[in-house]
Image (spheres, grey):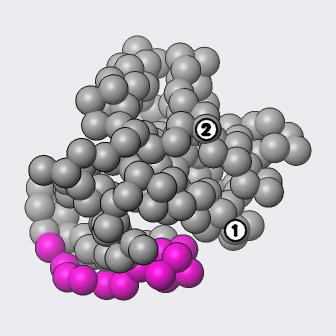
Amino acid sequence: MAEYPPMALHLETERLTMRPWTLDHAAALRELHAERGGGTPAIEDVREIIAKQLAEVERTGLALLPIRRRDVGDFIGYCGLLVGRSTVEEPEIAYELFQRVHGKGYATEAARAVVDAAIATGRKRLWSTVGPWNTPSFRVLEKLGFERSHVATDDRGEHVWLTRELP
């Protein structure tokens, strides 16, 4: 198993900043999870999710980072790398943004910064898994050079695997 340095935890783009989670993000992350449908999680559960995210950074050097718009300073979602269904050596890129900011290029902008952070660690490939219904995510990943690999099914349902070779 190759050793990789941790990914950068402070990312900036023209319009966005991404920094590590704090417990101050709990209320906004709770709203984002509620927007998925299926109810609003308890605030204690969301704080536990954040604590697990911070522990993953320590364990793997990979992070999902909260996204804030630079001009407004508001939390609009998250983007980053995780083990997920993959590995530390070839992690998954993941992102989720509030519906109110969809269609403005924020997911692509954040994900591009995360791909660059992955390249800086020396990794050779990234993966992503996307529900077959999620056309906007496919568009984001295609803009970033991801290509469809295969379809699989697990306890969370059917998902499409995409991959991107890194320089």
Q: Which of marks 2 and 1 is nearer the N terminus?
A: 2
The magenta region covers: 140-152
Q: In percent of the image, x 45 and y 61: which residue is there?
A: 119
**What is the secondary structure assignment of the residue under circle 1?**
loop
Of marks 2 and 1, the one in the foreground: 2
**Is residue 51 shown above or below 17?**
above
Query: Residue 26 at what x, y percent from top left?
Result: 53, 23
Q: Quadrant of residue 113?
A: bottom right
Q: Using a 10 Å C-alpha cutoff, classify the residue at mark 2 as few (fewer than 14 neighbours), some (14 to 19) or many (20 or more).
A: few
For image coordinates 72% across by 54% down, the residue present is: 13
State how many labels appear. 2
Q: Position of residue 8 (x, y in %)?
A: 52, 42
Q: What element carries label 2?
A: loop
Residue 27 or residue 64, whichever sits in front: 64
Q: Nearer the viewer, residue 151 or 64?
A: 64
Q: Is residue 147 magenta?
A: yes
Identify which amino acid the numbered label 2 is placed on: His
Tell me if label 2 and label 1 are in contact, CB under 8 Å.
Answer: no
Q: Does the magenta stretch include residue 78?
A: no
Query: In the picture shown, does residue 72 fall above or below 40?
Result: below
Residue depicted at 54% across the width and 30% down the height: 20
Q: Give the left or right position of residue 106, taking residue 50 as reference.
A: right
Pinpoint residue 1: horizontal percent, then vertical percent: 12, 50
Q: Which mark is residue 35?
A: none
